[in-house]
Structures are given as structure tokens and as C-alpha cells.
Image (cartoon, rainbow, N blue to C red):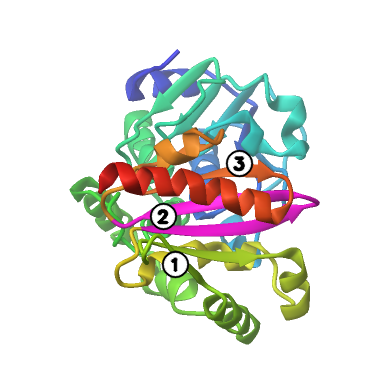
């Protein structure tokens, strides 16, 4: 059941002992939303906890500053930035069918929760958490704003992706006014990399493939590559933006090995191709300009499947 912002705020206000779920392989938006909402609930005098199947990436650990773990039996479950139960990971398996409220900005959300607060036009789920704070009558603190600004900045590529709206900028300005160190956040996420990350990026770029007369560019990251360069997958979270940066590329394709014959596919569109629709044909989804899916099988087969789907989409837009 889809509900309004006002209805979601009313429901949250009536609950206590809340468990907040973040998706596996967590990014800035799911963790920013999770910890931001936790601070809001604590300001309301409620008990709350956060769970994620995977550890916090090193680059996002600052979001957990001030977080205190409490021991209680959850009476309400909220998911943030999770479009599909499969994205919860094994660690959240006990809660997959017990989500009372899902807060999300992915149009491809599978409606798995009892209640859904969904705004597909929002640049990040953190935007919705900002608006929920207003509806709940909670004044934004620097701690809340640090979390929420992180999610908005990372999901918009530092406010330069197509999903950025005037409201995104207005909300970001409000968060900046709380006194957060936004310059550090942006430098930390967009302008700072380890030598190992840069070395792996260099190899990825040198092995980049071009298809469909240069309209698509494809990169591959394997678990062996992570081991050789001493880099984790989480540290290479922004690598999917690389193929789309090439002049003339309409669709950027990133294939990341996740396990034996399992690959995460990330697609990024420059202007014309709806990559969410492309991923939907392969069991995934996302946004018009950024989407993903998971494919299983030998790498050559996986690569052929995604190229076939992208090729059809490019042909339709020709």
C-alpha cells in the first residue's frame, strides 16, 4: 500500500522499538538514510537500531559516529533505499517478509512492504528522510544533516547527475546551513582515492571495451583483481561512472564478479536510453539513467546477455 509523506510520518510517530534495514553492499544513500532516520527517531525519544548484511565501507564509517546499539525486540521494521527484497542480503533474511514501511526513491520498487513511501522523482532516499523530519516536527541537527547530505551527494555524483532537481539543491542548502563540513564530505567521496584504487582503475580503463560503434563502453572487475590490488568492492563503488565519461558513449556497462558465476551489472545512460527498462528485462531495475541487475552463468555468457539487451535498446533509440 503506497502512503503519503504525512501518513508515513503519522505511522512512525505512533511506533517504538524500530529496526531500520539498509541494503547489502551499502552505499551513501542507504546508510545516510538509515543513520539519518535513526538520529531523527532518537530525537523523538524512541528506541531504534540499524541492520545491514554487510559491514560499513571504510569510506562511510563516519556516518555511524554517535550511533549507540540498544538491545530490544523490534516491534516495527523500516527499510530505506531498498527496491527489492533480494537486495537485503542473507543477513536480513529474517526480516524480508516483516517490513512495515519501505522508504524508497526507486520507481522499480517491488512493493514488498506493508506500507510504501515512494517518490521516484527524488534524487535520493535521503531527500525523503529530510521531508519526513519536517513532517515529524524534528529540527535538523548537524549529525542528521551529515548523514542526509552524504546520501544526496553520493546518489547525484556531487549534484551533477540528471536526477538532481531544484528541490535537491534546496534541501542540500538547508543541510549545509546546519554547519556540516560539506566540503570535506565532497572531497572525501569524489576527490580522494588510495594508490591501490587508482592502480585498479588504471587497469580497468586500459581493458575497457567499446561496442556498437562506440555507443557503449564496458568494463569488468573480478574478485581476482580486487585481491591483486588489495581493494574491496565497496572501495570501487564509483567505478560504474567511468565508462559513461567517454565522449560518444550513450550506455556505460560495468560487470562486477560477486561469486562463482554471479555478476552484478550496473548500467549508466548519458541521455537517451532508459537503462531501468533494460535491466527490467533481466530481472533488475533502478532509474532511467542508472540501473542494475544480477546475472548468473559463465562470464562470456553474462557479457553476451547484457550486450544483447543494450544493443536492442540502442537500436530502438536510433
Q: Which mark is residue 268?
A: 2
Mark toward the viewer: 1 or 3: 1
Residue 235, position as x, y percentages in the image: 62, 68
Mark 3 secondary-structure assignment: strand
Residue annotated with mark 3: 22
Q: Earlier in the sequence, mark 2 or mark 1?
A: 1
**Callout 1 crowding tier (Cα within 10 Å): few <14, some 14–19, many ≥20:** many
Relative image position of residue 225 (x, y in whole percent): 72, 72
Question: Horizontal and vertical percent for residue 238?
Answer: 50, 65
Res 75 visible: yes
Q: Which residues are magenta?
A: 251-270
176 or 170: which is nearer to us?
Answer: 170
Residue 65 lies in the magenta stretch = no
Where does label 1 land, which residue? 243
Q: Are marks 2 and 1 in contact (CB under 8 Å)?
A: yes
Q: Between marks 1 and 3, how big is the CA–CA gap?
A: 27 Å
Residue 173, by quadrant, is bottom left
Amino acid at each position: 500500500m503506497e502512503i503519503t509523506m504525512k501518513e508515513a510520518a503519522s505511522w512512525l510517530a505512533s511506533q517504538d522499538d524500530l529496526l531500520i534495514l539498509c541494503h547489502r553492499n551499502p552505499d551513501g544513500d542507504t546508510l545516510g538514510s538509515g543513520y539519518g532516520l535513526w538520529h531523527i527517531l532518537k530525537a523523538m525519544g524512541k528506541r531504534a537500531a540499524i541492520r545491514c548484511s554487510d559491514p560499513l565501507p571504510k569510506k562511510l564509517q563516519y556516518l555511524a559516529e554517535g550511533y549507540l546499539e540498544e538491545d530490544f525486540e523490534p516491534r516495527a521494521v523500516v527499510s530505506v533505499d531498498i527496491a527489492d527484497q533480494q537486495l537485503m542480503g542473507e543477513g536480513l533474511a529474517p526480516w524480508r517478509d516483516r517490513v512495515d514501511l519501505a522508504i524508497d526513491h526507486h520507481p522499480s520498487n517491488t512493493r514488498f512492504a506493508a506500507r510504501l513511501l515512494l517518490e521516484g522523482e527524488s534524487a535520493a532516499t535521503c531527500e525523503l528522510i529530510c521531508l519526513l523530519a519536517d513532517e515529524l516536527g524534528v529540527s535538523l541537527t548537524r549529525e542528521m544533516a551529515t548523514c542526509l547530505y552524504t546520501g544526496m551527494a553520493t546518489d547525484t555524483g556531487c549534484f551533477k547527475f540528471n536526477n538532481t532537481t531544484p528541490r535537491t539543491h534546496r534541501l542540500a542548502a538547508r543541510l549545509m546551513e546546519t554547519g556540516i563540513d560539506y566540503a570535506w564530505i565532497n572531497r572525501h567521496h569524489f576527490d580522494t582515492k588510495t594508490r591501490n584504487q587508482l592502480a585498479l582503475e588504471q587497469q580497468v580503463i586500459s581493458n575497457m571495451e567499446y561496442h556498437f560503434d562506440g555507443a557503449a563502453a564496458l568494463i569488468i572487475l573480478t574478485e581476482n583483481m580486487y585481491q591483486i590490488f588489495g581493494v574491496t568492492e565497496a572501495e570501487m563503488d564509483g567505478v560504474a561512472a567511468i565508462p559513461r565519461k567517454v565522449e560518444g558513449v550513450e550506455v556505460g556497462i560495468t560487470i562486477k564478479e560477486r561469486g562463482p558465476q554471479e555478476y552484478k551489472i550496473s548500467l549508466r545512460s548519458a541521455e537517451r536510453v532508459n537503462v531501468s527498462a533494460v535491466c527490467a528485462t533481466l530481472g533488475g531495475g533502478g532509474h532511467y539513467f542508472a540501473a542494475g541487475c544480477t546475472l548468473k552463468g559463465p562470464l562470456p555468457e553474462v557479457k553476451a546477455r547484457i550486450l544483447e539487451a543494450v544493443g536492442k535498446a540502442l537500436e530502438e533509440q536510433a
